[in-house]
Every structure is written in structure tokens, then in C-alpha cells.
Amino acid sequence: MYFYDVLEQAIISNDISLKEKLCMQCLAYCNQSEISVKEGFTPKVFDSPSYAKHCNIVKPSQLPTRKDFESKEGLATLVHSIAHIEYSAIDLALDAVYRYEDMPISYKVDWLEVAYDEIRHFKMLQELLHELRFVYGDFPVHSGLFEASVNTAGNILDRMAIVPRYFEASGLDVSPQIIQRLHNKRKIPEVSKLIKILDIIYEEEIDHVQKGDKWFSYLCDLENKNKDVYFEILAKYDLLDKHRPHVNVEARKQAGFSCVEIKKLGAKECV
């Protein structure tokens, strides 16, 4: 097999089972072989996300308002929105391996493992959607994460800052609040199942953000830059002043953020 052809096929496919199979092939290959790059190889910049084949993509302002989670449709809108984030994260992790071929083998293994986790998360949410009598693609989605991957395609330091250390880390801030909102409805079987899934995702996302922090730090050292460049990168992408309703201090510390960074992001205290 040619590693980068398999990765490309995994990224462009909208078949979750095929993505999983190809991801596992790439992981096995990384553990057994040296990764060679064909002469003249240039990674593609993809025109559209793989989910465009079965999702209606709209602007964030056009997304439907989430309804009462006690109704099946209302709960399904929440499950669908989280499933979409997890699906998008699969392609982002695969793309992080595909696009930056000069990175060490341990980097490739890290992001293939992240992709596999995201596949598992998506499949759990997909199963719950089916129980609610909906499928992925029944509700409109936005392409913000895909656009972030396109915008950072030419700069791996920006990619590590924007995707794991901004977007995924923001998920660490939001997930506990969603779980808390669902708590008083946990007697509903589907809500209880969603809470269990969100607990799994939350714990594993800490590891994903930590991997992003590790490789962000590695690249800062390689480029002789201070980690404070993170805030310059956020400003470059107009993300520095985005409203953060809550900064999850403990989760971000576990994921590698310093207290200096956490306070700059808006936390009042961090020790």
C-alpha cells in the first residue's frame, strides 16, 4: 500500500466503515514500516468536506434552534450537532497526518489514534441518532472546522494552534455545561445514553488536546518560538476575542495549558 493514497481515500470517503478500515490500515503500517513519500508528492487542498455528499451545509446563523431535549426531534438536533463535530474531527486528524509528511512517525501515530477515537465517538452518536429515528444528514450543518483546516493547510504550527488547542480545547469548556443541562432529564433513556457518550468523549478529548499541545510545543522549539505565539495565531485568525462563557481550568491544565495561558483566555483564577 502507498500510505498517502490510503490516507487520501480515507479523508474523501463519506463511508464511516471505510474510514475506520483505512485508518486502522495506516496505524498498522506506521507500526511496521518506514513511511516513504513519492517524489513530487504534493498533498491536495480539498474543495469540500467529505460530509458534503450527504449533509446540507449552511451558514452558522442558519442552523436550526435546538428544541426542548425532552422531544425526540429536539434531542436529535443536539446529538446530530455533536456527531457532526466528531465526524469533522475524523477528517481533521487524518488530514494532519496526510498534509505534513515531514513530521516524525510518532506524530503520525498520535493523530491516527485521534482519528480512530473520533470514529468511535461518531459511531456511538450515530447509533443514538438511529434509536431516535434520525440519521446523520437529517439536519443542516456548518463547515467551520473544514474551513479551519483549509485556512491552516500551509502552516502546521497554525494547524496545531487552531484545531486542537483552540477548537478542541473549547469543547473541553463546553462539554461539562451540556452534560449539566441534560442532568435533570437523565431519566429519559436516550438522554442517559447521551450523557454516558459525552462523558467518554470529554475524557478522551483531554488526551487529544494534550497531543495537540505536545506537537505545538515541539514545533515552537523547532522554529525557535515562544509558546506565546499561540495568542498571535489566534489573533491572526480573528479568534482571540471570541466570547468564552467558561474556561475549564482543570481540563486545560491536564491538556498542557499553563496558568498564564488559561488566565489570558479569561479564567479569573488558576493555581
Image (cartoon, rainbow, N blue to C red):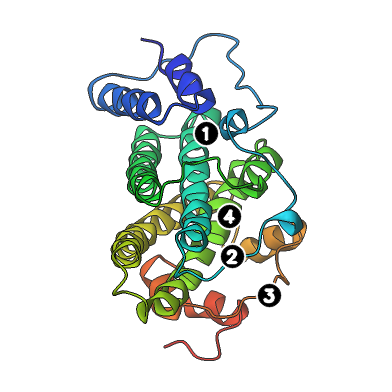
Nearer to me, 229 or 200? 200
* Residue at 73% from the left image edge and 72% from the top image edge: 241
Q: Is residue 217 visible?
A: no
Is residue 84 toward the left or the right of residue 194 in the image?
Answer: right
- The relative height of residue 13 versus residue 59 in the rendered view (above or below) is above
Mark 3–mark 4 contact, CB under 8 Å?
A: no
Is residue 128 toward the left or the right of residue 28 in the image?
Answer: right
Give the amino acid at mark 4. Answer: Ala
- Kindly give the residue lying farthest to the left in the view shown: 32
Pointer 2 or 3: first along the chain: 2
Q: Please state which of the two labelled residues, at mark 2 or mark 1, is closer to the viewer.
A: 2
Nearer to me, 208 or 156? 208
Q: Which residue is mark 4?
A: 161
Pointer 3 or 1: first along the chain: 1
Give the amino acid at mark 1. Answer: Asp
User: Where on the picture, by quarter, is residue 196?
Assistant: bottom left
Q: Which residue is mark 1?
A: 95
- The relative height of residue 189 versus residue 46 in the rendered view (above or below) is below
Q: Please state which of the two labelled residues, at mark 3 or mark 4, is closer to the viewer.
A: 3
Give the Cα separation between the discs numbered 1 and 4: 15 Å
Q: Is residue 151 visible?
A: yes
Give the amino acid at mark 2. Answer: Arg
Q: Which residue is mark 3?
A: 243
Q: Secondary structure at mark 1?
A: helix
* Residue at 56% from the left image edge and 82% from the top image edge: 263
